[in-house]
Image: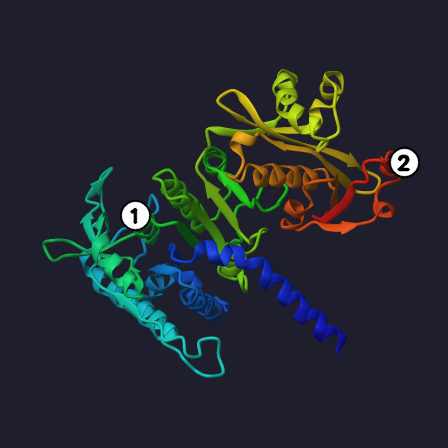
């Protein structure tokens, strides 16, 4: 009984904290690539249920369907070769009908799953309307470096106007990896290219790509929850990614560099991965952002003057403890800053307590002219990443005026006795700061 009550309270707490994300996504357009491999995952039915939930929340969905493994099997059944060159399938005339049939079978499977409405399933009364058609105009790849790609093509344009009309009428739009030319030909396209161009030409709010991996991992095998474009370039150059994940990352990079605000890579094997990525602060995969002209970086001694200018008003109001120039210079390696056009517009510090595997988040400050644009969130994510990199398990802070901001980001009030002994000895009872902590 107690376990059931606990589970219910956890669910209620999650649902309440997800409501800002639900509101933020309502009415947005998401392009979601479902590769052929996802259709063969044991988690595929859960992906269908989650997309039905997104539709019910007023999110406009454009689904792009791939069929790589299904095509490989269809060709293999007839002892036809599967030739891939530079990430693109070579499609001779004699293989085109097999590819069309394999793709059509996957599309019908997806439409059938989206049409379910059994009363004992999450699809009960969903009533989804799914539309597909000749919305992708294609052209042939032609001959590249001496290789004739036959009926393989690339996207010429997306019929955005027709798709918008369908979305406005509460339809879910399905785009296969096949495109059509004005001369009546059919071309086999790379699903990642269709998804990227759909996101760009529809001016979608997000491009989401399912892959076999959870996302992109660093050299310590830790998941990147967020990647800037220039860092993603380095990862691609270094290699080591599976082909499907490499293609996904390249597609995401192209999308965000063409003004799609966000792109995400998530696993088709993770139950609830799509919902977690969209509706929780931590997410479940990797989000790719375009490089910002604002840089989040480690502070240097040259930043001290700008930091003092930033901190002075907050220190004067008693929101932050006053720090001298000498102290800032001595502790500069503890700080992260956000630099905009050569000026320091935000900063925060991490003071580790290695023995207790905890760290103090301190001196969080954002210039008044630059508040309200998630700079505080970027600082917090940067500090959390650095704390985990140092092997810390808990992040704590002391505050007198900003408790609610931290509560909304997963911190919980705690007591002085939970702090490291050295920090307890330095506690200023006159300031009477409240103490909050968060497990990393």
> Looking at the picture, how far across and down is residue 36, in whole percent?
39, 61
Q: Secondary structure at mark 2?
A: helix
Q: Which of the numbered marks, if any, corresponds to residue 403?
A: none
Q: Nearer the viewer, residue 419 or 47?
A: 419
Residue sitting at the far left: 183
**Circle 2 crowding by C-alpha within 10 Å: few under 14, some 14–19, many from 20:** few
Residue beneath disc 2:
425
> Looking at the picture, how far across and down is residue 369, in whole percent?
52, 30
Q: Residue at x 70, y 23 (%)?
A: 332
Q: Secondary structure at mark 1?
A: helix
Q: Is residue 18 left or right of residue 400?
A: left
Q: Residue at x 72, y 70 (%)?
A: 6
Nearer to us: label 1 or label 2:
2
Whether the residues at callouts 1 and 2 have beta carbons within 8 Å, the answer is no
* CA–CA distance in space, label 1 to label 2: 59 Å
Q: Is residue 351 left or right of residue 338?
A: right
Q: Nearer the viewer, residue 83 or 162?
A: 162
**Which quadrant of the figure contains the N terminus?**
bottom right
Q: Nearer the viewer, residue 92 or 66?
A: 66
Does 120 appear above or below 437?
A: below
Q: Which of the numbered marks, if any, corresponds to residue 197?
A: 1
> Looking at the picture, how far across and down is residue 218, in whole percent?
58, 41
Does 387 appear above or below 102?
A: above
């Amino acid at each position: 009984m107690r376990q059931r009550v606990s589970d219910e309270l956890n669910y209620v707490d999650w649902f309440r904290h997800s409501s800002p994300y639900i509101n933020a996504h309502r009415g947005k357009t998401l392009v979601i690539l479902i590769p052929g491999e996802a259709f063969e995952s044991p988690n595929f039915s859960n992906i269908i249920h989650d997309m039905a939930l997104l539709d019910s929340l007023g999110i406009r969905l454009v689904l792009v369907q791939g069929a790589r493994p299904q095509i490989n099997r269809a060709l293999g059944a007839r002892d036809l070769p599967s030739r891939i060159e530079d990430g693109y399938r070579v499609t001779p005339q004699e293989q085109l009908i097999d590819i069309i049939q394999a793709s059509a079978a996957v599309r019908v499977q997806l439409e059938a799953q989206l049409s379910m409405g059994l009363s004992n399933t999450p699809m009960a009364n969903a009533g989804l309307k799914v539309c597909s058609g000749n919305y992708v105009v294609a052209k042939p790849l032609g001959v590249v470096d001496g290789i004739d790609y036959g009926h393989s093509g690339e996207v010429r344009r997306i019929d955005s106007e027709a798709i918008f009309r369908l979305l406005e009428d509460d339809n879910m739009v399905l785009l296969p990896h096949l495109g059509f030319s004005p001369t009546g030909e059919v071309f086999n396209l790379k699903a990642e290219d269709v998804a990227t161009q759909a996101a760009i030409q529809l001016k979608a709010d997000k491009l989401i790509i399912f892959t076999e991996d959870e996302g992109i991992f660093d050299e310590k095998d830790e998941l990147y929850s967020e990647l800037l474009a220039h860092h993603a370039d380095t990862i691609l150059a270094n290699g080591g990614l599976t082909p499907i994940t490499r293609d996904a990352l390249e597609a995401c990079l192209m999308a965000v560099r063409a003004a799609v605000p966000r792109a995400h890579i998530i696993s088709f094997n993770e139950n609830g991965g799509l919902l977690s990525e969209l509706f929780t602060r931590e997410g479940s995969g990797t989000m790719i952002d375009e490089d910002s002209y604002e840089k989040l970086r480690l502070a240097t001694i040259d930043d001290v003057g700008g930091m003092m200018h930033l901190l002075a008003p907050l220190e004067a109001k008693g929101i932050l403890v006053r720090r001298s120039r000498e102290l800032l210079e001595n502790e500069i390696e503890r700080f992260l800053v956000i630099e905009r056009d050569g000026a320091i517009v935000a900063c925060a510090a991490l003071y580790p307590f290695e023995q207790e595997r905890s760290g103090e988040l301190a001196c969080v400050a954002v210039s008044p002219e630059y508040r309200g644009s998630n700079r505080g969130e970027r600082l917090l994510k940067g500090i959390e990443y650095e704390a985990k990199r140092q092997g810390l398990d808990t992040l704590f802070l002391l505050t007198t005026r900003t408790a609610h901001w931290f509560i909304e980001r997963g911190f919980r009030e705690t007591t002085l006795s939970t702090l490291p002994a050295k920090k307890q000895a330095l506690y200023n009872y006159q300031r009477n700061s409240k103490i909050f902590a968060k497990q990393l």
